[in-house]
Amino acid sequence: MSDLTNPTWFRTARNNTVAILVKNRFLAPDTGAGDYRLPAAVTTVGEGVTVEDIPIGGHKSVQVEGIAEVECSAAIAVNDFVQSGTDGRAATAATSSAIRGRAKTATTAAGQMVEVELWKGRFIAP
């Protein structure tokens, strides 16, 4: 019989890029096991949100389930589908973008924090 694991909403992520991964941003898996980066496009399926700055070559926590705080790039309404820009900031999902979750709070301007209920898997905005 295989060992069972207890579920956790967090993963350890390694920054194998050439810049600091700033906290409260969406991430995408990179090519190496446990490596993360900013999303390449709004269609990139991501995995989690930084909960602290991750220095170059460093390992830190990434939240992959639950409700996470994400910095937004524009105003977002409650219950909007949320996508990630290539800078990792949240925005209202545009047609054909990958949905990262649903907004549980509203924002009125860029730079504010929105609470996002994270979704796993590939959901495409209508």
Image (cartoon, rainbow, N blue to C red):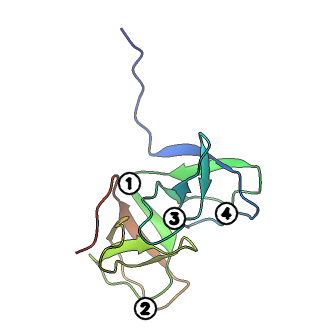
- Give the residue pinned by disc 4: 21
Query: Do tag 2 and tag 4 residues touch (Cβ < 8 Å)?
Result: no
Q: What residue type is labelled 1?
A: Gly
Comparing 84 with 52, the one in front is 84
Of label 3 and label 1, which has the lower sequence position? 3
Of label 3 and label 4, which has the lower sequence position? 4
Position in image of residue 95 (x %, y %): 29, 79
Q: Please, is residue 52 above or below residue 78 in the view? A: above
Query: Do tag 3 and tag 1 residues touch (Cβ < 8 Å)?
Result: no
- Give the residue pinned by disc 3: 26
Q: How far apart are marks 2 and 4 (CA)?
A: 24 Å
Of label 2 and label 3, which has the lower sequence position? 3
Q: Which amino acid does label 3 sit on?
A: Phe
> Dot 2 lies on which element?
loop
> Dot 3 lies on which element?
loop
Q: Please, is residue 54 above or below residue 126 in the view? A: above
Of label 2 and label 1, which has the lower sequence position? 1
The residue positioned 46% from the left and 54% from the top of the image is 47
